[in-house]
Image: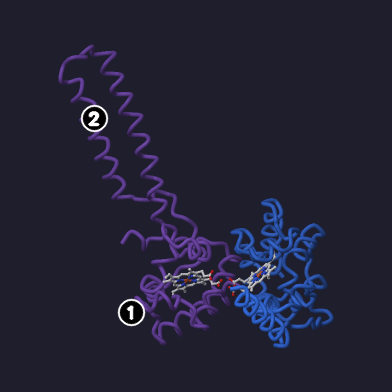
Chain colours: A purple, B blue
Amino acid sequence: MEGKDPRFHRINSINFELNKIFIYEFLFIVNLNIKKMKIRNSGLFVLLPVLTGAFLMLTAFGSLDSNPLGDVTPEETITIPDDIQGIFDKSCFGCHNSESTSDKAKKKLLLDQFTELSKVKLIGKLSEIAETVEKNEMPPEKFLSKYPDKALTNDEAKRLKEWADKTTDDLMK
Amino acid sequence: MKKIIKILLIFFLGIFVIIQFIPSGRPGNEPVAGQDIFEIASIPDDVGVLLKNACFDCHSQSVKYPWYSYVAPVSWLVARDVKFGRENLDFGKWGELSKRDKMKILGEISDEVGDGFMPMQIYITMHSEANLSDEERELIVNWAEELAEKIFEE
């Protein structure tokens, strides 16, 4: 799932950069064909650049697949264990991600960029998470009345709070 | 017709007078020596003025109540804001917070002020000096983030 990957927005931006390069190359080739070959009216004029462009795209996407991020893996201040990530995905991610439609939720907490926050910011946000979980404030009640299955179970709440507290303690050391 | 209006007027006036006797529950100021943020943390003068003007009437132990906050039903609203405001953040009891809670609240200050959620809009309409410009918001945000870094490194 794309949204699960904390780095998906980076992949998108790389894609965008690559696409820009393709377009430039494409235009360049079109230009070249017109100037050098003087084949303005032949079918080759259209076909050649289209084929070259398609070829370039394919090779580039191939390389994206085998090595999606190159060297730009972002620094991660912490790693979120799988079971905690599972809780976030089930109950929190829908509102707290950078594509969310809830502005307020977005401004308070972005789980897709969470692990890249500075230590100081992380301590603040982890303490907020611990607090909202302890007070049973998240997910919001209104939301739960529509989607009761998104609620944190007692066990999940306990694990989430313990994880947030422990991670804060580790960061404070 | 005129009679009905008169009766209604007297009726509402009566209610208005009666509700003045309901206690508003406005919390008083109980400053604790040595706990106020101004006695503990480093706050540049320009930021200090902004905090006092824009935040202290709800988030401190030096709340100044204007005349209308003595008149019900406004007094109830003011009392509620001060009560919940202090529950979330009390600059007058800064010293009682743990290192971790200080960092949390400074992060929240940076978010709330940076995103324009604080001070509360209703307060700004009554107190023009709390209408912070973008530059003033940035001053507070930067101060909060620097102070959080400082506390972290202590």
Secondary structure at badge 1 equals: helix
Task: Give the alpha-carbon distance from disc 1 to disc 2, as whole Å.
Answer: 51 Å
- Give how far across and how far down residue B78 sits, in percent: 69, 75
For residue B36, what is the image quadrant? bottom right
- Give how far across and how far down residue B31 sits, in percent: 81, 81
How many badges with numbers are in the image? Answer: 2
- Residue that appears at 36% across and 29% down: A24
Q: In the picture provided, is B147 more to the left or to the right than A11?
A: right
Q: Which residue matches tag 2?
A: A52
Marks 1, 2: nearer the viewer? 1
Quadrant including the N terminus of chain A: bottom left
- Residue that appears at 48% across and 65% down: A105
Work out whether B118 lies above or below B86. above
For residue A150, what is the image quadrant? bottom left
Quadrant including the C terminus of chain A: bottom right
Q: In the rendered structure, the residue with mark 1 lies on which chain? A: A
Q: In the picture provided, is A102 more to the left or to the right than B36?
A: left
- Residue that appears at 62% across and 74% down: B5
Q: Point out the residue furthest to the left here.
A: A43
> Reading the chain from its start, which is encountered first: label 1 or label 2?
2
**Viewer-closest of A24 and A56:** A24
Q: In the rendered structure, the residue with mark 2 lies on which chain? A: A
